[in-house]
Each structure stands twice: as C-alpha cells, then as structure tokens.
Image (spheres, coloured by chain):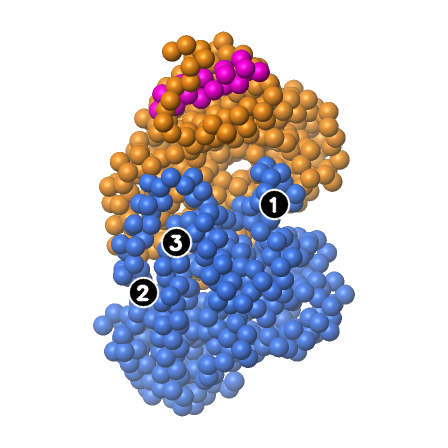
Chain colours: A orange, B blue
Amino acid sequence: MTSTAVPAVGRAVPFFRQSASFAELWPEVLGHLDELFAAGKFSHGPKVAELESALAAWTGARHVVGVNSGTDALVLLLRGGGLEPGDEVIVPAFTFVASATSVALARGRPVFADIDPVTYAIDPLCVAAAITPRTRMVMPVHLFCQMADMARIVELAREHGLIVVEDSAEAIGMRWDGRHAGLLGAGGVLSFFPTKTLGALGDAGAILTDDDDLAARASALRHHGRFGATLNDFTAISNATELSGINSKMDDVQAAVLLAKLGHLDDDIARRAHLAAAYTDRLADAPGILRLPTVVAREAQTNPVFYVYLVEVERRDGLASYLADRGVETETYYPTPLHLQPCFADLGYARGDFPNAERACEHALALPLYPDLELDEVDYVCELVRRFYEVG
Amino acid sequence: MQIPFFPPNLFEDDRDVLCEIVRAIGTGTSARLILGEQTACFEQELRTALGAADVVACSSGTSALTLILTALDVGPGDEVVIPALGCAPLASTVTNLGATPVFADVDRWTMVADPDEVARSITSRTKVLMPAHMFSVMADMPRMRELATAHGVRLLEDSALAQGGVLGGRPAGLWGDAGVYSFVQVKTFGTAGEGGAVITGDAELGRAVRMLRNHGQDGKRRFMHHRIGYNSRFDEVQAAFLRHRLPGLRARLDRRAAIAAHYTERFADLAEQGVLAPPAGGDGRCFYVYTLLAERRDELREHLAAAGVASHIYYPRTLPRQPAFATAGTWPHAEWASQRMLSIPVHPLLSDADVEHVADAVVAHAAAGKAYVVEH
C-alpha cells in the first residue's frame, strides 16, 4: 500500500458496532433470558444478583451494587460515602459531565482541577492546590486507557483527611498493583453504557467497594432507601424507608446481556489492545498528529485497557468532518471542559483556568475502537487521516 | 390452589417477542440503543392516545417525579404538599432536592389526600402540590386544581400507578401541570424492567424535562450541558416491548376493572363484619392494586394465606413515621388506614375461578368474625 492509496474497505466505519459478536453471543444471552423468564422478576431480580456476584469475582471487589447507570452509581457512591450538602469534591475539569453533576446531584459542590496532559487524568499537584477547609472528597477519573496517579492521590488524601472516590466508569479491567480500579479508595463505579468495554443494550451501572457500610447505604439508596435484602424480592417494597433514596434498579435483561459478555471480557480487552497497537503503528509518523495515546509507566504495576483510542490532532473539527464525509464516525471526547459548561456557570470559573483541560478539548478526537472492528478498517481510518493532512 | 399476589408468568405469552427484540437490537446496525427511534415512536403513540402536549420516557416513575420537580425549580426553602400515606418517592424526591415535604392527612376510606387537609398545609413557602392516586382511587383532582390555581402554586400529579384511569373524562396524568407513569413490571402498563414517563400538557415543561433526563443536553449539540441534569433515559428494548404490549392494554385494564367490580359486589355488605371494600364505580378509578380495610387485618391475612391467597400490606407505616422522613405531628386518618390496609390479587391473569376463590376466602373470614364494624 502506498501512502496515498485509500484502501477500499467497502463499508462505512461506524463509531460502534457489535452485530457480528452479538450474533455469536446470542445463544448465551438466550440461556440467561430463559432463566430470567423462569424466575419472572425483570428488574432488581435474579440476573442482577448473579451479575453482582460475577463482577465481584472478576474485579475482586467485596461488594458490587448494580444500578441503573454509571451516573446513578456516582451519586450513590458519593451519598453512600457520606457526602453532606455543601461538601466540596475535587474533580477534573476534563471528563464526562457526570463526574461533576453527580456531586451536585448529591448536593455537594464540585471544585475543578486541571489534568495531566498525557493521561488526561487529574493532576495531583492541582488537587493539592484546590483543597479548602470544606473539601471532603477527591474524585479521580480514569479516562480512555489508563488510571490516574492513584499512589499520589491516595497519599494526598491521607495527608489531608479526604475520602477518595473513583470515577472508574470507563476503567473495567484496569488494575493498580493488582487492585481493580475503583478499589483504591472508598469505592468506585462501573458504567455499562452500550459502547463501554463491558456494554449492555441500554443504561446500567454498578458501585464497587470493599466497605461494608458504604455498600449497605448505596444498596438501600438504589431501592428507595430500604434496608434489608431487597434484591429479587417483591415484598421488600414495604420495608421501612431508612434513607431518602432513589429508584436505580437495574433491568435483568441488561444483566443477562452483561453476564453473557463478561465471559468474553478478557478476549475483548485483548482485541482492543491489538487494535490500539495497530492504530499506533499506522499513525506513529503521520502528519497532523499532536499526541497518540501514551501509557505512563508507574512504580506500581498497571495495565492499560483501551476503552477509547484518543488522539490529539491539528484542526480537529476539520478532520472529524473529513472522516464523517467518508463514512468514518468519530467522537469528540470532550469538546468543552467542565468549568466552561453552562450548567456550572455559577461556580465562577473562566477560560484560562485549566489550560491542559482546555487544550485537550481543542484537539482530542476518539477513533473507532471495539472488538468487532477489523484491521482493514483501521487501515482505512489511518489512511484517511494521512490524506487529510497531506492534501492539506 | 395457590394465588400469588403478582403473576409470576406475566410475560409468558410475550417471551418470543422479547427475545427477538433483544436479538434484533443486539445484532442490528443502529448504534442508538438508548433514546432511539423506538423510544420516539413509543412516546408519540402515548402522546396521541392521551392527547398530551408531550410524553417523555425516562428511567422510572420516581425519576419522572424528580425530573418534574427539578424542572419546576424546587429546591432548598421550598415546600411541597404530599399525602401522609403513600410510597417513599413522594417524600424522597422532595427531600433529595433539599426541599421540605409537608404531609397532608388522607381520607380514610379512599386513602388519597383530603383536599381540606391539603389546603390547611399550604404556606407562603409552598411551591408545588403533589397529590397521589392510591391503589385504585384517583385523588380529587378537580379540587386540587382549584387549590393550586387559588394559591398560585404548581400541581404535580403522582399518577405513577394510575395509567389507564380516567376522571371526569380526563386521563390520569393530565390533571396536573405534569403527571407521571411507572412502567415497572407489576404496574398496569408494566414492562420487562424499569421505566417511566412524564406526561404534560405544557410543551415548555416537556422540553425542560427532555433536557434534564439526558445530562442537560438540548438534543442538538452533544456534550453541551445547559443544566445540571440526570441520566434518566429509556432504552430501545423496553420501548419496542411496550409498543408491542400497548394494543393489549385496554383489555388488561378492563379485566382488572371487572375483577375489582366483582370483588366490590361480593364484599358490599362486609363492613358490618370488619372488612371494607373500596368505593364502587369506574370514574376516577384504576385498578392497579385492590385494597381492603380490615379491622382484624392480621387474621384476615393468615386466613387468606391458609387458603393459598397471597396478600400484601403496602404501607404499614405512614410517610412521616418512616425513619428517613421522620416528622412530628399526627395524621390520624393515614395512621388508621395504615393499620387496616390489606391488598389482594387483582392482576389480569387471574382466572374467574381464582377470583371467586379469593372472594370466597375474604367472605368466609368476615362471616367467621364477630361484629367488627369498620367505622369509615
């Protein structure tokens, strides 16, 4: 292949696709659905209980609490961890909005800090600078393919008496000296949004924690504040309401899909790593590229998991349109930093406050990455990227 | 004969349909598995059937209440008047926003908020009245509307359990500035999981709720968050399944109503023997749950259990007596009802023989008792 020839893959490259793998998976999904029909409870039921146990075994978490979404998981993690109205929580300025809105929904106050430009995770030095007497918690977010600097964040939190809660929504499979993401502090979350490394067919999420009390509170809060065994029990709707909770029960249909996929998760993660390496190989010397994913070596033993293959490029929006015109879908993670979002206008931040976050928002682009993606599609995407910058 | 409270085989006839929906969506080419085409069609079908300005599908009935209260800017310092008897979300959705629930006592026969008590609960801080339909009886919505208008406050109708009910020609959910439905499986329009909807005649309120259910985004520009929003979305599996179930809803509602009417007829004279049936009639009724008021409730419950009939006590304590919402005061009618209520099976999969068996068991209990009159 020459550098100017565009391989004809003969089809568009969507940002996400699972039709082939789901067809292969279908007999396993159907097996779980058969068991679900036999039990007859379609939310907060037997498959959710089974998924919680299976995820506890897979992650090593003492408790897994299945809920309706990753966002709800964050809210319940914060409330379960003891956040009180008015408490400050330090969150990165570059992340999905739920990292910060969850704080507001739990009636706390998000305080933003800048990110490390390589890992896109919160910079421990910026965390230290953001601590006030009202700071109660710090929420590192593990984005795209690797974890935040948990050693320094945990140390900093210990020094200042802060609680660490991890937004590990994207971080299934990432471990730090053998401990799964979400288990380095008080607790963490998982999101099973369909495009996630472990994705459902709708919204679903979970809380991970080794803390018995946090788990009990989060578990009660997801079911209207009712303590006691509520999973797979209709009559629990009359249990006493001990806490002012929400309804964040997970659908068992989603749990059935996730259970089927969980058995293949290691293979899926390996496939993602293979495809990510292929992107890096093809884009290493491409023009227009400002940064390719760089996995930072830590003193701790860590492992990347490529949920997202994120590049930083010149003329990002131009490239995204160019690719879209040729059938290649991309995502902009994220176009606007949180401190400049209209919903946080009253917090009083301004452009220039967090330069690394702002720079990432200007240049970051996520390329298609999922187990069903084929290598010739990676070739096609990379060749289009080259052409865009070579033609100018 | 064993008669469970909720049908264990609720979706047995729809099993192949649900499995095919899951397979087709999983193997399909659309990447929009949440708030996609099925959800839009489902919302449109409900909107047309109801004549609402907007129907917004979301993650649950509870979440629907939260979305509306948030859209109405309820927050710290605000009061919301709710019934003293009912489900936890009535109070929790208010307290979670930092606002204060004010508990109004109920009518002890119908168990819905007493409009005079609601009127007495209104203060200068009241922002919203939130009456709830209870078991099978719709709240007195014409009076609630009058009160809301007279005091210049908003009216949120907790119609989570009343989908299909009609009062004075107006469907449950459309009496308030907004109302809600719950699609959790046991509800009158239950799905194979969780779900809910906001129903409103106010298009502007509908737009605000749409934004709030998906992280404050406007549906046009992704990752631009105008308001602090929620993740309270609806997925394509449930939307497709409910679209499949919608044509059968009328017949299922009719079956519930017929069972309830038969019960009420059989129980008409039992008040003198300590068992009071809900008021007869069809207007302003929706038979999600059929609830008796029994002087010897525990005995009735045991008698039914011995006859193989499962029953349920929904609210053994009033909302202000729940630890999470503990409030000083007395709500005598709510407390009276919470000590007597017992719900019996009314779901549409009951056979005529099942219904007769349940009714016989209740009547036999009453006949065996001394004269325990229910003074309602």
Q: Which residue is mark 1?
A: B218
- Which amino acid type is marked by label 3? Ala
Identify the secondary structure beneath mark 2: loop
The answer to whether marks 3 and 2 sit on the same chain is yes
Q: Is residue A9 above or below residue B359?
A: above
- Which amino acid type is marked by label 1? Asp
Q: Which residue is mark 2?
A: B7
Chain assignment, label 2: B
Horizontal placement of A271 versus A206: left or right?
A: left
Task: Give the mark nearest the N terminus, 3 or 2.
Answer: 2
Residue A116 picture location, percent across and down: 60, 20
The quarter holding residue B113 reads bottom right
Q: Is residue B287 above or below residue A293?
A: below
Task: Residue at 38% x, 66% y: name it.
Answer: B247
Identify the secondary structure beneath mark 3: helix
Residue B164 picture location, percent across and down: 46, 70
Q: Nearer the viewer, residue A294 or A133?
A: A294
**Residue A388 falls within the magenta-colored stretch:** yes
Residue B240 numbered tag: 3
The span shown in magenta is A374-392
